[in-house]
Amino acid sequence: MTKIYNLRAATNVTFRLTRDLSNLSQVYDLVASTIRMQARVTALATDPPIYEWCSTNVSGGVASFDPATGLCVFSAPASDMAQMPARLVYDCRLELTNGGITPLFSGRMEFVQGVTRRTNDAVAIGLPPGDTVVAQGETAPSALPVTLTAAVTAAQAAEVAASQSAAAAAQSAQAAAAGAASLTPDALAASFAALSSSQAAALAQLLIAALPGMSSGSVPVASGQAFFDASGFFVRAG
């Protein structure tokens, strides 16, 4: 069943309506197909329509489908909207490359008479950063493609900040580890307290490398001392 969207637009602003066609893009080749939307005073009104949006248009009423997001933006310049009737009916369809036609959505289109305008509104200078057309029952205009939303920009900034914070934490951890590796023999006393003679001997060369300035000295351990002998080995006595 065709979805119903009753739309409300204005005659003094750029027309922009975004619809999510991502589900259809999984079934049809929307890029190769033609997306067409027409508005008429009545459904049986003869050609030409009051207005048409189409994916093959390069100006005027344009339907721009983004395969990356699955969103389609229907847009038209404010100059074209200035003379739109107050009430229209419309529908939108997908024209497939094999000649097949698939209805997408339909409904009523109401244009509120705008008040604020300028004579150079006739010149279209790109699209506004958000939808200007509201569908009845929707609390806000449809979302923009994710690459254009302020929310995503903020999320990306938060992600960068979190990444930088994680990197700083990693650097701090590395610095702490480096500091632990350069402890003096006296500070290692507790760590060596439970070492056996074989364990102390195994660590001797590591300690010599970590503390190259230490050629003699001892560390108190349980029931005796651990010290560097004449050969430079760290051994336990007592």
Image (cartoon, helix red, strand yellow):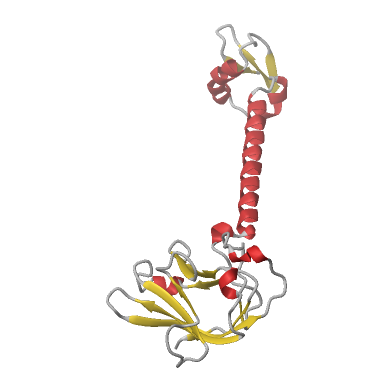
Q: Position of residue 66 (x, y in %)?
A: 45, 63
Question: Is 193 on the left-hand or right-hand side of 48?
Answer: right
**In the depicted structure, whether residue 42 falls above or below residue 114:** below
Q: Position of residue 222 (x, y in %)?
A: 69, 26
Question: Is 79 on the left-hand or right-hand side of 225?
Answer: left
**In the depicted structure, whether residue 104 falls above or below residue 59:** below
Residue at 63% over, 42% down:
164
In the displayed image of the protein, which residue is found farthest to the top?
Answer: 230
Residue 83 visible somewhere in the drawing: yes
Q: In this rendered view, identify the residue nearer to me: 152 or 192.
A: 152
In the displayed image of the protein, which residue is found farthest to the front?
Answer: 119
Asked which quadrant contains residue 172, the reply is top right
Asked which quadrant contains residue 141, the reply is bottom right
Residue at 62% over, 39% down:
167
Q: Position of residue 177 (x, y in %)?
A: 63, 31
User: Quarter holding the N terminus?
Assistant: bottom left
User: Quarter holding the C terminus?
Assistant: top right
